[in-house]
Structure formats: C-alpha cells, structure tokens
Amino acid sequence: MPVSHLIRSSPVWLFDLDNTLHNASHAIFPTITANMNTYIARVLGDGVTPADDAIVNAARAAYWRRYGATLLGMVKHHQVQAAHFLHETHAFDDLRAMIRAERGLGALLKRLPGRKILLTNAPLRYSSDVMRHLGLQRHFTQHIAIEAMHVHRQLRPKPSTLMLRKLMRKHQIRPGRCILVEDTLANLKGAKRLGLRTAWVTQYLKMADPIGVAKLPRALNRPAYVDVKVKSVRHLARRLHRLR
C-alpha cells in the first residue's frame, strides 16, 4: 500500500490533557478551583469586599452551563481579560509535585497508529509544563491550547463544534478519521455530532462536570455518542477495532 494512502487513512488522535493523560483531580483541579473562586470573588465584589461564596458558586455554575466554560462568562459579562484570568487561575507553587499519572503512557502513545494532537482547554504555559513533566511532548505533532481556539475572533474552547470544524478544515482532516479522547462528556457529545469517533476515559473522574457541581452517578453507563469507554488511555490499543 502506498505511504501516501496510509497517511490519509490512519487515524488522527485528539487527546485531552487534564483527567485524561494525568490525574488533575488529585491536586491540580482543587487548586485551580480555589484560584478561580478567589478571582471571581474579587471581580464580583464591590472593590473592597470580595463577593461571598454563594454568589461566586452561582456565577461559576451559570457561566459553565451557558457557555461551556466559566471563563467565557467572565469575559462576556465582566470584561475580564482571558489571558489574565488563565494566568491567575493556573498559578501553582510546585506543579511537578502535584502531577499524578500512570507509567507507560509514552509507550502506549507510540503503539497507537496515526498522529496525535493535544487539544486542551488549558492555557499553553500550564499544559506545556505538564506535558514536559510527563515526558510526552515528542509523541504529539501539535499542541492546541485554549489560546488558539478562536473562531471569528471569538474564543471558542471545547465543546465548540465551530472550533472543531475549523480545526478539521485547517488540517484537511475528515472527521471520520479523528478520534477524540476525553474525560468530559459534553466535549465528546459535540464531537460525535460532527462525525468524530469518541473515547471516554473515566478513571480520574470525581464529579460529573468540570466545575464540581454534579456528583457522578453510581454506574458510569456509556452514552450512545461514546464509541468506546475505557478506564485508562492505556486500554485504547485493545479497543482500537471499535474506533476505526
């Protein structure tokens, strides 16, 4: 078979980062949540006294449900600068010490056929640091962080189907060749509507939503828009036949 045909027919993997390639729920997400609450309380306060917890939690939940990301609500309704919000909320004293991940991820990624793209709603500096600590950068041909997720000059992070369509067009990839590997069901659902294959990673999930409002159901049933449900990305290779 010609090499050019192999390249065109091989899958393109879109890997999420947090709670997919590493356990962000262990220490990183709690720190981001605390930083975010402090930031939002300051913005929603009266200039002297920060807003109380009830107001902060209500704003975070409302903006996440309406826009898919709290950041978008803060930008739209409070004229927050996205870069400043991301910098402040992703500030860590010792990021390396907070990272927890399985061994053998590099070998797993090397075994998976096709090229891999990191597609994360996290900011570039943070996601680059995590990938460096994990030693996984060399397995990815591209790294798409939230700063690159603009459509018509508007920030459109996952689960935006507009952003995914733009990505497909830019890289001349048919949706049917793409496999999105994620922990967040809303992101998988949108991708499936566009014709992508979907893999749901569950082992690091502690809550049913990224903002920690809804608890997980006792049984993590596989929704119809999820092609493959795996506990760990290390199980993807054995389920590859269902993703192609």
Image (cartoon, helix red, strand yellow):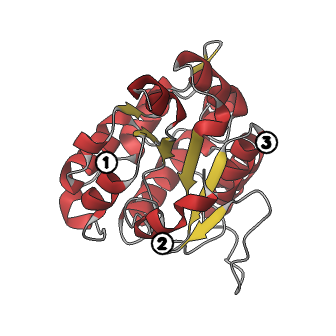
Residue at mark 2 to residue at mark 3: CA–CA distance: 25 Å
Say few, some or many: other residues with alpha carbon within 10 Å of mark 2 (under 14 / 14 to 19 / 20 or more). Answer: some
Give the mark nearest the N terminus, 2 or 3. Answer: 3
Q: Residue at x 66, y 34 (%)?
A: 175
Give the mark nearest the N terminus, 3 or 1. Answer: 1
Element under label 2?
loop
Q: Position of residue 228 (x, y in %)?
A: 63, 64
Residue at mark 3 to residue at mark 1: CA–CA distance: 35 Å
Q: Amino acid at mark 1?
A: Ala
Q: Which circle, 2 or 3, is nearer the viewer?
A: 3
Query: Front-most of 130 and 200?
Result: 200
Say few, some or many: other residues with alpha carbon within 10 Å of mark 3 (under 14 / 14 to 19 / 20 or more). Answer: few
The residue where tag 3 is placed is 193
Q: Amino acid at mark 2?
A: Tyr
The residue where tag 1 is placed is 91
Q: Position of residue 51 (x, y in %)?
A: 60, 52
> In this rendering, would 38 be left or right of 74?
left
- Most extreme residue toward the front is 1
Instruction: Say which mark, if any, is on residue 204.
Output: 2
